[in-house]
Amino acid sequence: MFRKFWLDVILGTAFIFGMMGVFQSFTAFKVFDVFDPIGQAFGDMEFTDIVFSQLRDDPVGDDRVVLVNLSNLQRGEIGMMLQIISQHNPAVIGIDSFFYTPKEDTLGDMMLMEGMASVEHLVLASKLLPDPTDPTKDTIEYSWELFNSFAERTAFVNLVTDAEVQEDLKMCREFYPKFDIGGEQQIAFAVQLASYLDSAAAADFLARNNETEVINYRGNVLDYGATKFGNKYFALDVPDVFGENFVPDMIEGKIVMFCYLGKHLGDRESFEDKFYTPLNQKYIGRAFPDMYGGVVHANIISMILNRDYINSMSENMGYLFAILICFLNVALFSLVYKKIPKWYDGITKLFQLLEIGVLVFGVIYILELYSFKADIAVGMVAVALAGDALEVYYGVVKNSFTKEGRKSLFKVDKL
């Protein structure tokens, strides 16, 4: 009897994961999508977002990274700003923008090149173009080679999102620290910039050798309340640079990043190079993206320099956790099913609700207290399905394999 019980527990667990596999193949694994528009509000949300948007204490701003707004400037104007900033001896200047081809305005191109030439340490952006079907066809895109020749380094600016096109919701929680293209290792833009200020910190970060890293967000630039922590980085708008409305110490020895921050600082109407982040005050049903790409890179730089990483549960550990918690639930629910069947539905539903609540609470506070992100999504789905799926297993699947069960299905009581 004891052996038969545990065999049922094993088979019941396997049945639940089989159901999950079937649901996933029919895209029914995205539970909230059934309830549109509720699904649209919850589909882009993770419980851990609550940590960044609601629970974090106000962090200290980081003055080691200074952002310069490119706005909608012409190339010649960008070159002039580079010359102004470079004379104050920054540790490095990175440009998060592309200059793909020469323009008819050759004077503007020449002024941009003069600006680039004035920078002692210049990092220009590159863009990874992975081929989803054949990694050997992965390529990388650069600015025009004449501009690129002024760069000491190039580094890719790609960030990880689920968006397929610019208009899609771009939720950014993680990034690639490095990427292999044709056997050559490419380094992420933020990692490359951080190395100029602390090469050991950048090397330690890369030595973690994770394919992706969760971004430990610190804060934003001027955002008028879009995120909980605004004004954590110094940012210079176009008039500030041309009017030299800053002190030299603000630039000297710092990482300076030229990037798009809207038509002007605080511009909330522009969606160009803008992302949703876990810092967004509206973590459910987000209305507007809250952070420009350059600020995302700045947050990554701070994380690297501070060695303030977020560790993540591996995918294999996530599945192992899911199997274990499903197995335990099946064992408990099987006892209820056999010992007190009349109470089965009520007890299992109550236990599932309590268990999911505890799991959500645990995930949130483990991230907050230990900077560890536990990916237990599969385990939570297993818990949610366990009660009803196990009832199907005992009432349908198991009975269909017994002679008595099949007979009872078609048995007609006599009047």
Image (cartoon, helix red, strand yellow):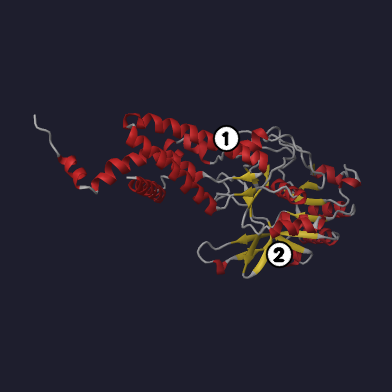
Judged left or right of residue 61, residue 408 is left
- Which residue position holds label 2? 144
- Judged from the image, the secondary structure of the residue bearing numbered disc 1 is helix
- Judged from the image, the secondary structure of the residue bearing numbered disc 2 is loop
Judged left or right of residue 320, residue 407 is left
Which quadrant is the N terminus positioned in? top left
Q: Residue at x 81, y 52 (%)?
A: 255
- Whether residue 288 is visible here, answered yes or no, is no
Which mark is on residue 361? 1
Which quadrant is the C terminus positioned in? top left
Q: Residues within 10 Å of mark 1 (few under 14, many from 20)?
A: few
Q: Quadrant of residue 369?
A: top right
In this rendering, the answer to whether 406 lies above or below 75 is: above
Give the percent coordinates (x, y) of residue 392.
Answer: 31, 41
Query: Which amino acid does the dot numbered 2 rest on?
Result: Trp
In this rendering, the answer to whether 253 lies above or below 246 is: below
Query: Which amino acid does the dot numbered 1 rest on?
Result: Phe
- Whether residue 366 is visible here, answered yes or no, is yes
Mark 2 or mark 1, which has the lower sequence index? Answer: 2
**Residue pushed farthest left?**
415
Judged left or right of residue 28, residue 186 is right
Q: How many marks?
A: 2
Judged left or right of residue 193, residue 175 is left
Give the percent coordinates (x, y) of residue 162.
Answer: 55, 49
Between disc 2 and disc 1, the foreground one is 1
Give the percent coordinates (x, y) of residue 173.
Answer: 62, 46
Q: Give the Cα separation between the discs numbered 2 and 1.
A: 50 Å
Q: Residues within 10 Å of mark 2 (few under 14, many from 20)?
A: few
Q: Residue at x 43, y 35 (%)?
A: 35
